[in-house]
Amino acid sequence: MDSTETLHESAGAAAAEVHASGHAHPRYLLVWLWLALLTAAEVAVVGFTALPKSWIVIALLIMAVWKALLVALYFMHLRFEPLRVAVMAASPLPLAVLLVMTVLQEYR
Amino acid sequence: MEAHAMPYYGGRTPETGLAVYTQKVGMWVFLCSEVMFFTGLIGSYIILRFGASETWPQPGEILNIPVTAINTFILICSSVTMVKAFAASEVGDKRGTRLFTLATAVIGAAFLGVQIYEYSELLGHGFGPWSGLYGSTFYTMTGFHGFHVFSGVVCMTWATVKAFRGGYDNGNYQGLEVLGLYWHFVDLVWIILFTIVYLI
């Protein structure tokens, strides 16, 4: 079987197909459905005023990171890139987290 | 079998260290710098919000969350059409490539249209960049993101014309892949901004 036609099993989004670039193509519509559902859930969570504000903020941040990961891993194909590319792509994240945490520390 | 066991570079020069072609490495380096640009904006927002003496409005008090949620969904849809355009060009589906690049440009423009509508509504109610820290941070963050979307729409329009002229035929999909990385990054940034600016 030609490598461009090989079915590739990915843990997250079930079967994916490998093409000329070496990328696997996950089920994009499934990822889209998750993103749409999470967006709807975010809007719904804001309406739960009975919950403590801190719980709502944590829930919103988790869903935002979840959505961002779906885009990065499946739409930007980081899940299927060589590890070195993924490391390069993730390289600014520690600095970004450090900056945000340092700034937040000022207002604890 | 590994997904990237036999990469194909379509005549492009692969970076020997990273095993991907140079243009893609360049885009990733650019996106890394963009991460720090938007992180700087978010850091400034945190300082201004938590250090503000004025009361920060509650979510939905000034900004229209339902309209922006729909706009978020619109941008997510454009990411799907973008990745479908890349997938179509990769397998030589000329019709799919043209259809999805055109759809991405149109949907991206629709996102900008909704943002312009949102701005006009807010300005009509007297909420502008001069309306305290809340107004200035809102317009700065969403404005910079909107500029990125505008740049993406311009590039997507050019890519659509190129697709209709057959520029992505015969395995020449790398340009769409690199442009797609930028487009998805803009989507990703909006996901974060939507949460921070509108919902929290």
Image: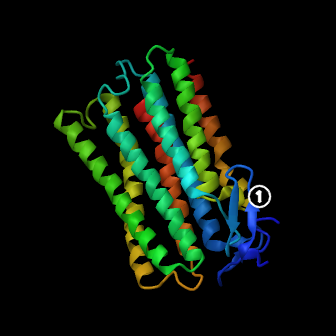
Q: How many marks?
A: 1
Residue at which label 1 appears: A83
Q: Residues within 10 Å of mark 1 (few under 14, many from 20)?
A: few
Of all residues, the one furthest to the right in this rendering is B1
Figure quadrant of the N terminus of chain A: bottom right
Q: Nearer the viewer, residue B183 or A74?
A: A74
Above/below status of B55 relative to B118: above
* Side (left or right) of B54 relative to B180: left
* Side (left or right) of B104 relative to B179: left
Q: Nearer the viewer, residue B51 or A82?
A: A82
Above/below status of A77 relative to B132: below
Q: Position of residue B79 (x, y in %)?
A: 49, 57
Residue drawn where x is 57% and y is 69% of the image:
B87
* Side (left or right) of B20 relative to B144: right
Q: Nearer the viewer, residue B194 or B3?
A: B3
Q: Position of residue B91 (x, y in %)?
A: 60, 77
Q: Position of residue B102 (x, y in %)?
A: 39, 70
Residue drawn where x is 52% and y is 45% of the image:
A35
- To which chain does the residue with label 1 belong? A
Of all residues, the one furthest to the left in this rendering is B124
